Image (tube, helix red, strand yellow):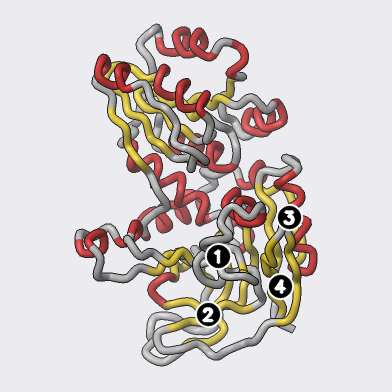
Amino acid sequence: MKAARYEGQGRIGVGDADVCPPAFEEVQLEVAYVGICGTDLHILDGDMDARVNLPAILGHEMSGKVVAVGANVRDWKPGDEVVVVPLDWCGACPACLRGFSHICYRLNFMGIDSPGALQNVWNVPQRTLVRVPTDLGLMRAALAEPTAVAVHDVRRSELRAGQKALVVGGGPIGLLIASVATAVGADVLVSEPNGQRRQLIDQAGLRTVDPADDLAVAIDEWTGGAGVDVSFEVSGSQAGVDAAVASLAARGRLALVAIHSRPPTVDFFRFFWRELTLVGARVYERVDFEEALQLLERGAIPTNALITDVVPLSDASAAFAQLRAGQAMKVLVECGPLT
């Protein structure tokens, strides 16, 4: 078996790995595709060296097929096509006891805190599996995890049909949030400074604006001076936070999606003056994965605009390089059948 590992100091190496049989209540998967995301780049940059155990097998956006099952696994059989909710929770902390296991205080995020999917074969707890719809296909199914992020963000924001939503940041997650928000019937605008990204988003049938072209004026013209009902801060920048807050209508809602490298400043006077609401949105729940797969199945997600390239596992470092260079939305690593 082969696996791609983060070796420290910005290096990705591909080498042999052991294949172990699935343990009690585990399922063994033949990994088909793995998506690389911004968190993986942060790991490669060394920003999370205190958290990952080197050498670390990364990858948490994936699709695959069941090849073996451990003891006490009854709902899955070889040949089943699945995706993995890469969250393993303790079940005993205050968050878990209140029903919020996705934000467990001792959460094991698979692919970060424990070995991930960038390998031919991956053993995971059976409770993490979600079945792929019959006609979706494993390549598109590999977008289930980032789509679930967007579904969770939109659900947390309580965005409704007919409302106006501003998405600040047009990367992969911004594009997915805009797509999910459109699917619920909202009127959506994406603010993105990168012209290449704006072109891709426009081609996906969504509306964009360059924030350098006086975003405040564009918002006023779009909303008749009222402001938007919901803004999603996806850029991870101070300017993005400022724009997202300034765009909101009275009793508007800010969904904070991005992970900021340092705590941003927030205009709380604006929150007081307009009775705004700030909502945190982190990862996802199982229901978000299920809805994500349904959206992918019915074509509500522009997969062609999102998937920039597919590379083999042997060249996994190229996927990271493309993203780092800003040349891609989403690069998939094809892990292929075990040979």
Give the spatial CA distance, label 2 vs label 1. 18 Å
Up the image or down, 208 lies above or below 60; here it is above
Give coordinates of residue 103: x percent, y percent: 34, 57
Residue at 75 percent of width and 48 percent of height: 322
Q: Which residue is mark 3?
A: 319
320 sits left or right of 261 in the view:
right
Could you classify mark 1 by the number of other residues whose Cα lies within 10 Å: few (under 14), some (14-19), or many (20 or more)? many
Give how far apart the Cα atoms at labels 4 and 2 are: 16 Å
What residue is at 36 percent from the left and 57 percent from the top? 285
Separation of residues labelled 4 and 1 (CA atoms)? 25 Å
Query: Three-letter amino acid code at disc 3?
Result: Ala
Residue 52 numbered tag? 1
* Residue that badge 4 annotates: 336
Find residue 239 and report its horizontal and vertical position in percent.
Answer: 52, 24
Circle 1: residue type = Val
Task: Give the mark nearer the N terminus: 2 vs 1.
Answer: 1
The mark that comes first in sequence, 3 or 2, is: 2
The nearer-to-camera label among 4 and 1 is 1
Residue 118 vertical placement versus 197 (above, below): below
| Label 2 with label 1: CB-CB less than 8 Å | no
Mark 4 or 3: the one toward you? 3
Q: Position of residue 296 (x, y in %)?
A: 52, 51
